[in-house]
Amino acid sequence: KNEVEQSPQNLTAQEGEFITINCSYSVGISALHWLQQHPGGGIVSLFMLSSGKKKHGRLIATINIQEKHSSLHITASHPRDSAVYICAVRTLRGSQGNLIFGKGTKLSVKP
Amino acid sequence: ETGVTQTPRHLVMGMTNKKSLKCEQHLGHNAMYWYKQSAKKPLELMFVYNFKEQTENNSVPSRFSPECPNSSHLFLHLHTLQPEDSALYLCASSQDRARDTQYFGPGTRLTVL
């Protein structure tokens, strides 16, 4: 079992729908990242958070440290949001924790 | 030019070839990383360099050999690879090793025949 699990693996939505992607982890962390990977391969960092909630445009990320769970929400989804969304956690192991990645959630937003 | 660039974007090589992947960052960062992304698997950290010194080798086979001549450039030298090494190889950089957001390059899609 991976230390970082994402659900769902694949998600298809209609344009305008509210989308939620979930991430659960089983290790102690200092921070959690949400990343976006477009079909060409390039990865963009969306959020880094260690508590509470962050918002950027139509994207909202939340984290519950006690429950070891984070969600990424997309409001008013658009076809250009189609991408793979990856959750990664920075572990507390060692003096400089590494990033451990989930397998990603492939989102497809239909017009 | 800004951000993190990688060349080549696509590479096809035979098992007996020797090739190199190049990564360059124009962000003034001190830490650089190589990752491997295989189909249906999470990103795997391969190597970490901090201030040009290798600080992590994540049990990577010796047929992959990294080189960091300065804090802006990172290479991955490849020799006698196996077909299972076919993957997307991503370079990233961050201001420092411990806490900062990592910025990724576009990746090199490698196919080993």
Image: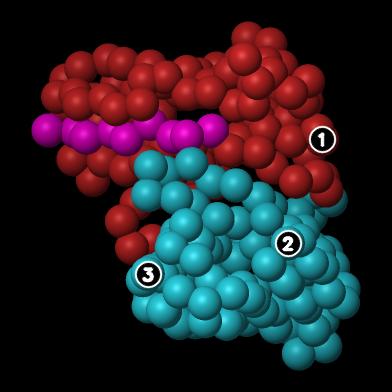
Q: Give the camera-side residue of A46 and A87.
A: A46
- Pointer 1 chain: B
- The residues colored magenta run B105-113
Q: Give SS at disc 3.
A: loop
Q: Which residue is mark 1?
A: B96
Query: Which amino acid type is shown beneath numbered disc 3?
Result: Pro
* C-alpha span from label 1 to label 3: 41 Å
Q: Give the camera-side residue of B67 and A16.
A: A16
Q: Nearer the viewer, mark 1 or mark 3?
A: 3
The cyan-coloured chain is labelled: A
Q: Is residue B107 magenta?
A: yes
Residue at 70% of width from left, 83% of height from top? Answer: A69
Picture coordinates of residue A103 (x, y %)?
46, 66
Q: Nearer the viewer, mark 1 or mark 2?
A: 2
Q: Which residue is mark 2?
A: A57
Residue at 66% of width from left, 50% of height from top? Answer: A45
Neighbour tally class for label 1: few under 14, some 14-19, many 20 plus, Cα within 10 Å: some
Using residue B71 as the reference point, say whether residue B113 is left or right of it.
left
Neighbour tally class for label 3: few under 14, some 14-19, many 20 plus, Cα within 10 Å: few
- Pointer 3 chain: A
Q: Which residue is mark 3?
A: A111
Quarter-wise, where is residue A83 in the image? bottom left
* C-alpha span from label 1 to label 2: 27 Å
Picture coordinates of residue A97 (x, y %)?
75, 54
Picture coordinates of residue B8 (x, y %)?
36, 20
Picture coordinates of residue A31 (x, y %)?
79, 63
Residue at 60% of width from left, 66% of height from top? Answer: A87
Neighbour tally class for label 2: few under 14, some 14-19, many 20 plus, Cα within 10 Å: few
